[in-house]
Amino acid sequence: MTPLQKAALLAFSRLAVEQAAALAYARLSQAPLFFTSAYGELSPMLRITQSILEHDLPISPKDFQHSVLNAALAYLTMNQNWHQAGFAFSGGYLSADSTLHLASHRLKAGLDTAAIIIHAHEQHRRDGEGEAEAEALILGVETPPHSAYCLQRSEWLAEPRAPGEGTRVYRELHSPELIPWLIEDKGPVLERQLINRKGQALVTTWTAY
Amino acid sequence: MTLASPLGCSPDSLLRGLLTEKRGLSFDHRFRGWIAAPLGELPWVELGLKIEDPRETDLALHGASRVLVDQLNQEHNFLTRYTPEELGLFVGTTTSGINGFFRAAGLQKINGQNFEQLLKADMQQAWLAQELSDVFGLRGPSWTLSSSCAASAQALGLAYDALATGMLQAALVVGADILNLVTLLGFEALQVLDHELCRPFEAERGGINLGEAVVVLLLEKAPRSRPLNRIVAYHALSEGYHMTQPAPEGRWMRSAMEGALHKAQLSPADISYLNPHGTGTEANDRCEGQAIREVFGEKLRSHPSKRWTGHTLGAAGALEAAITSLFLNSEASTQAARSKSNFGLSNSFGFGGANVSIVFEGVV
Protein backbone atom coordinates (compact mmCIF):
# COMPACT_ATOMS: atom_id res chain seq x y z
CA MET A 1 0.00 0.00 0.00
CA THR A 2 1.09 3.57 -0.64
CA PRO A 3 1.40 6.19 2.12
CA LEU A 4 -1.86 7.79 0.99
CA GLN A 5 -3.71 4.48 1.05
CA LYS A 6 -2.38 3.65 4.52
CA ALA A 7 -3.30 7.09 5.82
CA ALA A 8 -6.85 6.89 4.46
CA LEU A 9 -7.33 3.45 5.96
CA LEU A 10 -5.91 4.58 9.30
CA ALA A 11 -8.21 7.60 9.42
CA PHE A 12 -11.20 5.39 8.67
CA SER A 13 -10.13 2.89 11.35
CA ARG A 14 -9.87 5.72 13.86
CA LEU A 15 -13.39 6.74 12.96
CA ALA A 16 -14.55 3.17 13.48
CA VAL A 17 -13.12 3.19 16.99
CA GLU A 18 -14.01 6.71 18.07
CA GLN A 19 -17.42 6.92 16.41
CA ALA A 20 -18.50 3.32 16.15
CA ALA A 21 -22.23 4.05 16.54
CA ALA A 22 -22.20 6.79 13.93
CA LEU A 23 -20.29 4.60 11.50
CA ALA A 24 -22.75 1.74 12.03
CA TYR A 25 -25.53 4.21 11.32
CA ALA A 26 -23.74 5.39 8.18
CA ARG A 27 -23.28 1.84 6.96
CA LEU A 28 -26.91 1.02 7.64
CA SER A 29 -28.13 4.14 5.88
CA GLN A 30 -25.98 3.37 2.83
CA ALA A 31 -23.89 6.49 3.21
CA PRO A 32 -21.69 7.38 0.25
CA LEU A 33 -17.94 7.75 0.70
CA PHE A 34 -16.44 10.99 -0.57
CA PHE A 35 -12.68 10.73 -0.94
CA THR A 36 -10.80 13.91 -1.71
CA SER A 37 -7.16 14.68 -2.33
CA ALA A 38 -5.53 17.64 -4.03
CA TYR A 39 -2.57 15.79 -5.51
CA GLY A 40 -3.58 12.15 -5.15
CA GLU A 41 -0.95 9.41 -5.16
CA LEU A 42 2.36 11.26 -5.29
CA SER A 43 4.78 8.37 -4.70
CA PRO A 44 3.71 6.00 -7.48
CA MET A 45 3.13 8.92 -9.85
CA LEU A 46 6.60 10.24 -9.17
CA ARG A 47 8.19 6.83 -9.81
CA ILE A 48 6.22 6.39 -13.05
CA THR A 49 6.98 9.84 -14.44
CA GLN A 50 10.67 9.59 -13.54
CA SER A 51 10.81 6.14 -15.13
CA ILE A 52 9.40 7.58 -18.33
CA LEU A 53 11.73 10.59 -18.22
CA GLU A 54 14.71 8.25 -17.83
CA HIS A 55 13.44 5.91 -20.55
CA ASP A 56 13.58 3.19 -17.91
CA LEU A 57 10.80 1.13 -19.40
CA PRO A 58 8.57 -0.75 -18.86
CA ILE A 59 7.03 0.98 -15.88
CA SER A 60 5.83 -0.98 -12.89
CA PRO A 61 2.28 -2.30 -13.32
CA LYS A 62 1.86 -2.12 -9.55
CA ASP A 63 2.82 1.56 -9.53
CA PHE A 64 0.37 2.20 -12.35
CA GLN A 65 -2.59 0.65 -10.58
CA HIS A 66 -1.63 2.50 -7.39
CA SER A 67 -1.33 5.82 -9.21
CA VAL A 68 -5.01 6.51 -9.89
CA LEU A 69 -6.60 9.09 -7.62
CA ASN A 70 -9.24 6.66 -6.36
CA ALA A 71 -6.74 3.95 -5.39
CA ALA A 72 -6.91 4.81 -1.67
CA LEU A 73 -10.70 4.79 -1.81
CA ALA A 74 -10.63 1.44 -3.60
CA TYR A 75 -8.39 -0.19 -0.98
CA LEU A 76 -10.55 1.28 1.77
CA THR A 77 -13.71 -0.25 0.31
CA MET A 78 -11.93 -3.61 -0.07
CA ASN A 79 -10.61 -3.54 3.47
CA GLN A 80 -13.90 -2.45 5.00
CA ASN A 81 -16.16 -4.53 2.75
CA TRP A 82 -17.92 -1.29 1.85
CA HIS A 83 -20.21 -1.45 -1.18
CA GLN A 84 -21.89 1.93 -1.16
CA ALA A 85 -21.02 4.55 -3.74
CA GLY A 86 -17.51 5.95 -3.49
CA PHE A 87 -16.64 9.21 -5.24
CA ALA A 88 -13.06 10.39 -5.68
CA PHE A 89 -12.47 14.15 -6.00
CA SER A 90 -9.56 16.34 -6.89
CA GLY A 91 -10.39 19.88 -5.93
CA GLY A 92 -7.04 21.58 -5.60
CA TYR A 93 -6.80 23.97 -2.69
CA LEU A 94 -10.56 23.72 -2.13
CA SER A 95 -10.52 19.89 -2.18
CA ALA A 96 -11.76 19.20 1.32
CA ASP A 97 -14.17 22.11 1.62
CA SER A 98 -15.76 21.72 -1.82
CA THR A 99 -16.38 18.03 -1.10
CA LEU A 100 -17.86 18.96 2.27
CA HIS A 101 -20.06 21.51 0.50
CA LEU A 102 -21.43 18.91 -1.92
CA ALA A 103 -21.94 16.26 0.76
CA SER A 104 -23.76 18.64 3.09
CA HIS A 105 -26.03 19.88 0.32
CA ARG A 106 -26.99 16.31 -0.54
CA LEU A 107 -27.82 15.68 3.11
CA LYS A 108 -29.96 18.78 3.37
CA ALA A 109 -31.77 17.87 0.16
CA GLY A 110 -32.57 14.41 1.54
CA LEU A 111 -30.52 12.47 -1.03
CA ASP A 112 -28.37 10.91 1.69
CA THR A 113 -28.98 10.50 5.40
CA ALA A 114 -25.30 10.24 6.22
CA ALA A 115 -22.03 10.76 4.39
CA ILE A 116 -18.39 9.98 5.08
CA ILE A 117 -15.64 12.31 3.96
CA ILE A 118 -12.03 11.16 3.78
CA HIS A 119 -9.51 13.87 3.02
CA ALA A 120 -5.95 12.75 2.42
CA HIS A 121 -2.74 14.48 1.52
CA GLU A 122 0.73 13.12 0.86
CA GLN A 123 3.96 14.91 1.58
CA HIS A 124 7.19 13.92 -0.01
CA ARG A 125 10.50 14.05 1.76
CA ARG A 126 13.88 14.79 0.24
CA ASP A 127 14.93 11.15 0.61
CA GLY A 128 12.18 10.21 -1.84
CA GLU A 129 9.97 8.55 0.73
CA GLY A 130 6.40 9.73 0.93
CA GLU A 131 4.38 10.20 4.06
CA ALA A 132 0.72 11.00 4.20
CA GLU A 133 -1.99 12.13 6.56
CA ALA A 134 -5.72 11.77 6.31
CA GLU A 135 -8.81 12.80 8.22
CA ALA A 136 -12.25 11.24 8.21
CA LEU A 137 -15.55 12.58 9.37
CA ILE A 138 -19.17 11.54 9.32
CA LEU A 139 -21.94 13.94 8.46
CA GLY A 140 -25.51 13.09 9.37
CA VAL A 141 -28.92 14.63 8.79
CA GLU A 142 -29.78 14.23 12.43
CA THR A 143 -26.74 15.17 14.45
CA PRO A 144 -25.57 11.91 15.99
CA PRO A 145 -25.25 12.01 19.80
CA HIS A 146 -21.50 11.57 19.64
CA SER A 147 -21.03 14.67 17.54
CA ALA A 148 -19.56 17.79 19.05
CA TYR A 149 -19.94 19.94 15.93
CA CYS A 150 -22.75 20.70 13.54
CA LEU A 151 -22.14 22.05 10.05
CA GLN A 152 -24.37 25.11 9.79
CA ARG A 153 -23.58 26.41 6.37
CA SER A 154 -21.29 26.08 3.42
CA GLU A 155 -21.35 28.58 0.63
CA TRP A 156 -19.53 28.79 -2.67
CA LEU A 157 -18.67 32.41 -3.43
CA ALA A 158 -18.21 33.87 -6.89
CA GLU A 159 -15.79 36.36 -5.31
CA PRO A 160 -14.04 36.31 -1.94
CA ARG A 161 -15.77 38.53 0.57
CA ALA A 162 -14.58 40.53 3.54
CA PRO A 163 -14.29 38.03 6.36
CA GLY A 164 -16.39 38.49 9.46
CA GLU A 165 -14.90 38.68 12.91
CA GLY A 166 -13.62 35.29 13.91
CA THR A 167 -13.42 33.99 10.35
CA ARG A 168 -10.15 32.31 9.60
CA VAL A 169 -9.01 32.96 6.03
CA TYR A 170 -6.82 30.53 4.08
CA ARG A 171 -5.45 31.72 0.79
CA GLU A 172 -3.66 29.66 -1.85
CA LEU A 173 -0.41 31.34 -2.65
CA HIS A 174 1.81 30.74 -5.61
CA SER A 175 4.33 29.05 -3.39
CA PRO A 176 3.54 25.46 -2.41
CA GLU A 177 0.91 25.48 0.25
CA LEU A 178 -0.51 22.63 2.24
CA ILE A 179 -4.21 22.13 1.78
CA PRO A 180 -5.96 23.13 5.03
CA TRP A 181 -7.37 20.27 7.07
CA LEU A 182 -11.06 20.21 7.88
CA ILE A 183 -10.35 19.16 11.44
CA GLU A 184 -7.87 21.19 13.43
CA ASP A 185 -7.25 20.78 17.14
CA LYS A 186 -9.76 17.90 17.21
CA GLY A 187 -12.54 19.95 15.67
CA PRO A 188 -13.34 22.12 12.67
CA VAL A 189 -12.60 25.83 12.63
CA LEU A 190 -15.94 27.44 13.46
CA GLU A 191 -15.87 29.72 10.46
CA ARG A 192 -13.39 29.74 7.65
CA GLN A 193 -13.00 31.06 4.14
CA LEU A 194 -10.74 29.35 1.62
CA ILE A 195 -9.62 31.22 -1.48
CA ASN A 196 -7.85 29.47 -4.34
CA ARG A 197 -5.38 30.98 -6.80
CA LYS A 198 -8.23 31.74 -9.25
CA GLY A 199 -10.15 33.72 -6.64
CA GLN A 200 -12.81 31.09 -6.08
CA ALA A 201 -13.84 30.95 -2.46
CA LEU A 202 -15.75 28.75 -0.08
CA VAL A 203 -17.07 29.62 3.36
CA THR A 204 -18.00 27.01 5.94
CA THR A 205 -19.54 27.63 9.35
CA TRP A 206 -19.81 25.09 12.17
CA THR A 207 -21.45 25.26 15.58
CA ALA A 208 -19.88 23.64 18.59
CA TYR A 209 -22.17 22.04 21.16
CA MET B 1 -23.73 18.45 -26.40
CA THR B 2 -20.48 19.07 -28.16
CA LEU B 3 -17.78 16.50 -28.47
CA ALA B 4 -14.63 15.33 -30.15
CA SER B 5 -13.96 11.62 -30.42
CA PRO B 6 -11.91 9.36 -32.69
CA LEU B 7 -15.02 9.31 -34.90
CA GLY B 8 -15.08 13.05 -35.52
CA CYS B 9 -15.83 16.40 -33.98
CA SER B 10 -19.61 16.38 -33.90
CA PRO B 11 -22.41 14.22 -32.53
CA ASP B 12 -23.53 13.59 -36.13
CA SER B 13 -20.15 12.27 -37.22
CA LEU B 14 -19.98 10.08 -34.11
CA LEU B 15 -23.40 8.56 -34.77
CA ARG B 16 -22.69 8.17 -38.48
CA GLY B 17 -19.38 6.47 -37.71
CA LEU B 18 -21.00 4.05 -35.30
CA LEU B 19 -23.90 3.26 -37.61
CA THR B 20 -21.52 2.52 -40.48
CA GLU B 21 -19.18 0.61 -38.14
CA LYS B 22 -16.25 2.86 -38.94
CA ARG B 23 -13.17 2.22 -36.84
CA GLY B 24 -11.71 5.35 -35.28
CA LEU B 25 -8.60 3.36 -34.35
CA SER B 26 -5.31 3.36 -36.18
CA PHE B 27 -1.75 2.02 -35.96
CA ASP B 28 -0.47 5.22 -37.52
CA HIS B 29 -0.70 7.51 -34.51
CA ARG B 30 1.43 10.15 -32.80
CA PHE B 31 2.68 7.68 -30.15
CA ARG B 32 3.89 5.04 -32.62
CA GLY B 33 7.45 5.52 -31.38
CA TRP B 34 6.33 4.29 -27.95
CA ILE B 35 3.39 1.93 -28.50
CA ALA B 36 2.74 -0.56 -31.29
CA ALA B 37 -0.94 -1.04 -30.44
CA PRO B 38 -3.66 0.87 -32.31
CA LEU B 39 -5.05 4.02 -30.71
CA GLY B 40 -8.10 6.20 -31.19
CA GLU B 41 -6.90 9.76 -31.70
CA LEU B 42 -8.95 12.93 -31.90
CA PRO B 43 -9.09 14.51 -35.36
CA TRP B 44 -6.90 17.39 -34.23
CA VAL B 45 -6.80 19.15 -37.59
CA GLU B 46 -10.60 19.12 -37.78
CA LEU B 47 -10.65 20.63 -34.29
CA GLY B 48 -8.38 23.40 -35.55
CA LEU B 49 -5.57 22.42 -33.22
CA LYS B 50 -2.05 21.30 -33.94
CA ILE B 51 -0.02 19.06 -31.64
CA GLU B 52 3.67 19.85 -31.95
CA ASP B 53 4.78 17.38 -29.29
CA PRO B 54 2.61 14.34 -28.41
CA ARG B 55 3.83 14.61 -24.83
CA GLU B 56 2.22 18.05 -24.38
CA THR B 57 -1.03 16.44 -23.31
CA ASP B 58 -2.39 19.23 -21.14
CA LEU B 59 -2.02 21.78 -23.90
CA ALA B 60 -4.10 19.54 -26.16
CA LEU B 61 -6.63 18.89 -23.40
CA HIS B 62 -6.96 22.59 -22.68
CA GLY B 63 -7.31 23.48 -26.36
CA ALA B 64 -9.94 20.86 -27.17
CA SER B 65 -12.00 21.55 -24.03
CA ARG B 66 -11.93 25.27 -24.69
CA VAL B 67 -13.12 24.86 -28.29
CA LEU B 68 -15.96 22.56 -27.30
CA VAL B 69 -17.22 24.58 -24.31
CA ASP B 70 -17.18 27.68 -26.50
CA GLN B 71 -19.07 25.87 -29.25
CA LEU B 72 -21.72 24.65 -26.80
CA ASN B 73 -22.12 28.13 -25.39
CA GLN B 74 -22.67 29.51 -28.88
CA GLU B 75 -25.52 27.03 -29.25
CA HIS B 76 -27.09 27.45 -25.82
CA ASN B 77 -25.83 30.72 -24.29
CA PHE B 78 -25.57 29.15 -20.88
CA LEU B 79 -22.91 31.60 -19.77
CA THR B 80 -25.34 34.49 -20.03
CA ARG B 81 -28.57 32.67 -19.24
CA TYR B 82 -27.45 31.49 -15.80
CA THR B 83 -25.99 33.33 -12.83
CA PRO B 84 -22.72 31.98 -11.43
CA GLU B 85 -24.57 30.38 -8.52
CA GLU B 86 -26.98 28.59 -10.86
CA LEU B 87 -24.41 26.96 -13.12
CA GLY B 88 -22.04 24.26 -11.86
CA LEU B 89 -19.09 22.59 -13.52
CA PHE B 90 -18.46 18.85 -13.15
CA VAL B 91 -15.32 17.48 -14.79
CA GLY B 92 -14.48 13.79 -15.10
CA THR B 93 -10.86 13.07 -15.96
CA THR B 94 -8.01 10.79 -14.95
CA THR B 95 -4.90 12.55 -16.18
CA SER B 96 -5.58 16.26 -16.45
CA GLY B 97 -2.47 17.97 -15.05
CA ILE B 98 -0.10 15.19 -16.12
CA ASN B 99 2.37 17.60 -17.75
CA GLY B 100 2.66 19.57 -14.53
CA PHE B 101 3.64 16.31 -12.88
CA PHE B 102 6.26 15.55 -15.52
CA ARG B 103 7.74 19.03 -15.08
CA ALA B 104 7.94 18.62 -11.31
CA ALA B 105 9.40 15.11 -11.58
CA GLY B 106 12.04 16.39 -14.02
CA LEU B 107 13.00 19.27 -11.76
CA GLN B 108 13.23 17.00 -8.76
CA LYS B 109 15.58 14.72 -10.65
CA ILE B 110 17.80 17.58 -11.77
CA ASN B 111 17.86 19.64 -8.58
CA GLY B 112 17.24 16.97 -5.99
CA GLN B 113 14.73 19.42 -4.62
CA ASN B 114 12.19 18.28 -2.03
CA PHE B 115 9.17 17.23 -4.05
CA GLU B 116 6.90 19.01 -1.58
CA GLN B 117 8.41 22.30 -2.76
CA LEU B 118 7.50 21.50 -6.36
CA LEU B 119 3.79 20.91 -5.86
CA LYS B 120 1.82 23.23 -8.09
CA ALA B 121 -1.82 23.61 -9.01
CA ASP B 122 -1.10 22.57 -12.60
CA MET B 123 -0.35 19.00 -11.52
CA GLN B 124 -3.77 18.29 -10.05
CA GLN B 125 -6.64 16.65 -11.91
CA ALA B 126 -8.65 19.75 -10.89
CA TRP B 127 -6.39 21.86 -13.11
CA LEU B 128 -8.70 21.59 -16.15
CA ALA B 129 -11.75 22.72 -14.17
CA GLN B 130 -9.79 25.68 -12.82
CA GLU B 131 -8.63 26.64 -16.29
CA LEU B 132 -12.12 26.39 -17.80
CA SER B 133 -13.56 28.42 -14.91
CA ASP B 134 -10.93 31.04 -15.55
CA VAL B 135 -11.28 31.20 -19.34
CA PHE B 136 -15.09 31.26 -19.39
CA GLY B 137 -15.64 33.22 -16.19
CA LEU B 138 -17.45 30.35 -14.52
CA ARG B 139 -17.64 31.56 -10.94
CA GLY B 140 -20.02 28.92 -9.61
CA PRO B 141 -19.19 25.67 -7.87
CA SER B 142 -17.01 23.14 -9.61
CA TRP B 143 -15.95 19.60 -8.86
CA THR B 144 -13.48 17.25 -10.52
CA LEU B 145 -14.17 13.56 -10.29
CA SER B 146 -11.28 11.19 -10.84
CA SER B 147 -12.56 7.69 -10.18
CA SER B 148 -10.62 6.13 -13.04
CA CYS B 149 -12.76 5.00 -15.97
CA ALA B 150 -15.98 5.86 -14.12
CA ALA B 151 -14.92 9.49 -13.61
CA SER B 152 -17.24 11.25 -16.01
CA ALA B 153 -20.12 8.84 -15.34
CA GLN B 154 -19.83 9.83 -11.68
CA ALA B 155 -19.64 13.49 -12.71
CA LEU B 156 -22.84 13.06 -14.69
CA GLY B 157 -24.57 11.33 -11.78
CA LEU B 158 -23.63 13.97 -9.23
CA ALA B 159 -24.60 16.76 -11.65
CA TYR B 160 -27.98 15.11 -12.14
CA ASP B 161 -28.45 15.01 -8.35
CA ALA B 162 -27.44 18.66 -8.00
CA LEU B 163 -30.13 19.67 -10.50
CA ALA B 164 -32.76 17.33 -9.11
CA THR B 165 -32.36 18.80 -5.62
CA GLY B 166 -32.38 22.41 -6.78
CA MET B 167 -28.77 23.02 -5.78
CA LEU B 168 -28.14 24.16 -9.37
CA GLN B 169 -30.25 25.15 -12.35
CA ALA B 170 -27.75 23.88 -14.89
CA ALA B 171 -24.54 21.91 -15.01
CA LEU B 172 -21.78 21.65 -17.51
CA VAL B 173 -20.38 18.12 -17.49
CA VAL B 174 -17.00 17.72 -19.13
CA GLY B 175 -15.54 14.26 -19.71
CA ALA B 176 -11.99 14.65 -20.94
CA ASP B 177 -8.90 12.49 -21.27
CA ILE B 178 -6.10 12.84 -23.79
CA LEU B 179 -3.64 10.06 -24.62
CA ASN B 180 -0.36 10.34 -22.73
CA LEU B 181 2.63 8.22 -21.88
CA VAL B 182 1.58 7.38 -18.32
CA THR B 183 -1.69 5.90 -19.51
CA LEU B 184 -0.24 4.15 -22.54
CA LEU B 185 2.75 2.62 -20.80
CA GLY B 186 0.68 1.86 -17.70
CA PHE B 187 -1.88 -0.20 -19.59
CA GLU B 188 0.95 -1.80 -21.57
CA ALA B 189 2.59 -2.77 -18.26
CA LEU B 190 -0.68 -4.32 -17.10
CA GLN B 191 -0.63 -6.36 -20.32
CA VAL B 192 -4.21 -5.54 -21.19
CA LEU B 193 -3.66 -3.75 -24.50
CA ASP B 194 -4.79 -5.49 -27.66
CA HIS B 195 -2.08 -5.03 -30.28
CA GLU B 196 -4.69 -5.71 -32.95
CA LEU B 197 -7.98 -3.87 -33.40
CA CYS B 198 -10.00 -4.59 -30.26
CA ARG B 199 -12.95 -7.00 -30.25
CA PRO B 200 -15.08 -6.44 -27.13
CA PHE B 201 -17.30 -9.38 -26.19
CA GLU B 202 -15.87 -11.59 -28.93
CA ALA B 203 -14.41 -14.95 -27.97
CA GLU B 204 -11.03 -14.02 -29.54
CA ARG B 205 -10.80 -10.65 -27.78
CA GLY B 206 -7.29 -9.62 -26.82
CA GLY B 207 -7.74 -6.53 -24.66
CA ILE B 208 -8.20 -2.79 -24.83
CA ASN B 209 -7.49 -0.22 -27.53
CA LEU B 210 -7.02 3.15 -25.87
CA GLY B 211 -8.58 6.32 -27.21
CA GLU B 212 -9.08 9.96 -26.31
CA ALA B 213 -12.16 12.16 -26.18
CA VAL B 214 -13.50 15.44 -24.89
CA VAL B 215 -17.25 15.61 -24.34
CA VAL B 216 -19.20 18.58 -23.03
CA LEU B 217 -22.78 18.00 -21.92
CA LEU B 218 -25.22 20.63 -20.72
CA LEU B 219 -27.73 19.47 -18.14
CA GLU B 220 -30.60 21.85 -17.48
CA LYS B 221 -33.43 21.77 -15.00
CA ALA B 222 -35.67 23.79 -17.32
CA PRO B 223 -34.20 23.56 -20.83
CA ARG B 224 -34.97 26.37 -23.22
CA SER B 225 -35.19 24.10 -26.23
CA ARG B 226 -36.21 20.47 -26.61
CA PRO B 227 -33.56 18.35 -24.91
CA LEU B 228 -31.92 15.41 -26.63
CA ASN B 229 -32.82 13.17 -23.75
CA ARG B 230 -33.13 13.06 -20.00
CA ILE B 231 -31.36 11.15 -17.30
CA VAL B 232 -33.93 9.06 -15.48
CA ALA B 233 -31.74 7.59 -12.73
CA TYR B 234 -28.28 6.30 -11.96
CA HIS B 235 -26.77 3.93 -9.48
CA ALA B 236 -23.19 4.03 -8.22
CA LEU B 237 -21.52 1.51 -5.97
CA SER B 238 -18.15 0.16 -4.86
CA GLU B 239 -17.21 -3.41 -5.63
CA GLY B 240 -14.74 -3.52 -2.76
CA TYR B 241 -13.18 -6.55 -4.41
CA HIS B 242 -9.96 -5.92 -6.36
CA MET B 243 -8.00 -3.03 -7.81
CA THR B 244 -8.18 -4.13 -11.45
CA GLN B 245 -10.39 -7.21 -11.62
CA PRO B 246 -14.19 -7.35 -11.38
CA ALA B 247 -15.79 -9.62 -8.78
CA PRO B 248 -16.58 -13.13 -10.05
CA GLU B 249 -19.67 -13.49 -12.19
CA GLY B 250 -20.05 -9.72 -12.43
CA ARG B 251 -21.95 -9.63 -9.15
CA TRP B 252 -21.49 -5.91 -8.54
CA MET B 253 -21.88 -5.03 -12.21
CA ARG B 254 -25.29 -6.68 -12.05
CA SER B 255 -26.09 -4.74 -8.84
CA ALA B 256 -25.23 -1.45 -10.54
CA MET B 257 -27.59 -2.15 -13.45
CA GLU B 258 -30.37 -3.48 -11.20
CA GLY B 259 -29.97 -0.49 -8.88
CA ALA B 260 -30.31 1.96 -11.76
CA LEU B 261 -33.40 0.17 -13.13
CA HIS B 262 -34.94 0.08 -9.66
CA LYS B 263 -34.39 3.80 -9.13
CA ALA B 264 -35.79 4.49 -12.61
CA GLN B 265 -38.82 2.30 -11.78
CA LEU B 266 -38.27 0.38 -14.98
CA SER B 267 -38.07 -3.29 -15.79
CA PRO B 268 -35.23 -4.76 -17.89
CA ALA B 269 -37.70 -5.14 -20.77
CA ASP B 270 -38.06 -1.34 -20.92
CA ILE B 271 -34.45 -0.92 -22.04
CA SER B 272 -34.07 -0.81 -25.81
CA TYR B 273 -30.41 0.23 -26.02
CA LEU B 274 -27.53 -0.90 -23.81
CA ASN B 275 -24.03 0.55 -23.99
CA PRO B 276 -21.85 -1.75 -21.88
CA HIS B 277 -18.49 -0.87 -20.39
CA GLY B 278 -17.15 -3.52 -22.82
CA THR B 279 -13.43 -2.88 -22.74
CA GLY B 280 -12.36 -5.99 -24.62
CA THR B 281 -10.41 -7.50 -21.73
CA GLU B 282 -11.03 -11.12 -20.93
CA ALA B 283 -12.17 -10.48 -17.35
CA ASN B 284 -14.36 -7.42 -17.88
CA ASP B 285 -16.28 -8.81 -20.82
CA ARG B 286 -16.75 -12.24 -19.26
CA CYS B 287 -18.13 -10.77 -16.02
CA GLU B 288 -20.12 -7.97 -17.61
CA GLY B 289 -21.52 -10.34 -20.24
CA GLN B 290 -22.77 -12.66 -17.52
CA ALA B 291 -24.23 -9.76 -15.53
CA ILE B 292 -26.04 -8.45 -18.62
CA ARG B 293 -27.48 -11.88 -19.40
CA GLU B 294 -28.67 -12.27 -15.82
CA VAL B 295 -30.39 -8.88 -15.84
CA PHE B 296 -31.68 -8.66 -19.40
CA GLY B 297 -31.74 -12.25 -20.62
CA GLU B 298 -30.45 -13.25 -24.03
CA LYS B 299 -32.66 -10.96 -26.11
CA LEU B 300 -31.12 -7.51 -25.58
CA ARG B 301 -28.00 -7.05 -27.69
CA SER B 302 -25.49 -4.69 -26.19
CA HIS B 303 -23.60 -2.16 -28.27
CA PRO B 304 -19.96 -2.06 -27.13
CA SER B 305 -18.96 1.25 -28.71
CA LYS B 306 -15.33 1.06 -27.53
CA ARG B 307 -14.85 -1.25 -30.49
CA TRP B 308 -15.04 1.87 -32.69
CA THR B 309 -13.84 4.67 -30.41
CA GLY B 310 -11.34 2.86 -28.20
CA HIS B 311 -11.46 3.17 -24.41
CA THR B 312 -11.37 6.87 -23.64
CA LEU B 313 -10.91 6.29 -19.88
CA GLY B 314 -12.10 9.24 -17.78
CA ALA B 315 -14.06 10.58 -20.75
CA ALA B 316 -15.72 7.23 -21.50
CA GLY B 317 -18.75 7.72 -19.23
CA ALA B 318 -19.63 11.05 -20.86
CA LEU B 319 -18.86 9.80 -24.38
CA GLU B 320 -21.01 6.71 -23.93
CA ALA B 321 -23.78 8.81 -22.37
CA ALA B 322 -23.67 10.87 -25.57
CA ILE B 323 -23.72 7.72 -27.69
CA THR B 324 -26.67 6.34 -25.74
CA SER B 325 -28.52 9.64 -26.26
CA LEU B 326 -27.75 9.66 -29.96
CA PHE B 327 -28.94 6.09 -30.44
CA LEU B 328 -32.14 6.72 -28.48
CA ASN B 329 -32.83 9.62 -30.82
CA SER B 330 -31.71 8.00 -34.03
CA GLU B 331 -34.28 7.21 -36.66
CA ALA B 332 -34.27 3.48 -35.95
CA SER B 333 -34.86 4.07 -32.25
CA THR B 334 -37.54 6.62 -32.95
CA GLN B 335 -39.44 4.07 -35.01
CA ALA B 336 -38.94 1.40 -32.38
CA ALA B 337 -40.15 3.78 -29.69
CA ARG B 338 -43.55 3.99 -31.33
CA SER B 339 -44.24 0.49 -30.18
CA LYS B 340 -42.20 0.37 -27.00
CA SER B 341 -40.44 2.53 -24.47
CA ASN B 342 -37.33 4.44 -25.45
CA PHE B 343 -34.91 3.93 -22.59
CA GLY B 344 -31.21 3.24 -22.72
CA LEU B 345 -28.63 2.21 -20.15
CA SER B 346 -24.91 2.94 -20.08
CA ASN B 347 -22.35 1.17 -17.86
CA SER B 348 -19.04 2.55 -16.59
CA PHE B 349 -16.82 0.37 -14.43
CA GLY B 350 -13.57 1.92 -13.19
CA PHE B 351 -10.37 0.63 -11.58
CA GLY B 352 -10.90 -0.12 -7.93
CA GLY B 353 -14.49 -1.22 -8.48
CA ALA B 354 -16.13 2.17 -9.11
CA ASN B 355 -19.33 1.03 -10.86
CA VAL B 356 -21.94 3.36 -12.36
CA SER B 357 -25.01 2.53 -14.46
CA ILE B 358 -27.10 5.37 -15.87
CA VAL B 359 -30.59 5.16 -17.39
CA PHE B 360 -31.55 7.65 -20.12
CA GLU B 361 -34.83 8.33 -21.84
CA GLY B 362 -34.84 9.50 -25.43
CA VAL B 363 -37.11 12.48 -25.92
CA VAL B 364 -38.70 11.57 -29.21
Image (tube, rainbow, N blue to C red):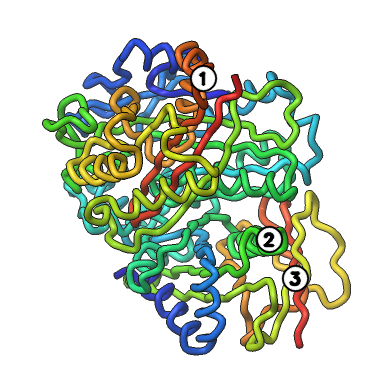
Q: Residue furthest left?
A: B204
Q: Chain of mark 3?
A: A
User: Residue at left 27%, top 60%?
Assistant: B242
Residue B78, image x, y percentages: 73, 30
User: Label 1 vs label 2: CA separation?
Assistant: 34 Å
Depth order, front residue of B321/B358:
B358
- Is residue B326 visible from the viewing direction of this image? yes
User: Residue at left 46%, top 79%?
Assistant: A11
Above or below, A170 relative to B195: below
- Picture disc at residue B348: none
Q: Nearer the viewer, mark 2 or mark 3?
A: 2
Q: Residues within 10 Å of mark 2 (few under 14, many from 20)?
A: few
Quadrant in the rendering for residue A174: bottom right
Q: Earlier in the sequence, mark 2 or mark 3?
A: 2
Q: Amino acid at mark 1?
A: Ala
Residue position marked by numbered label 3 in the rendering: A192
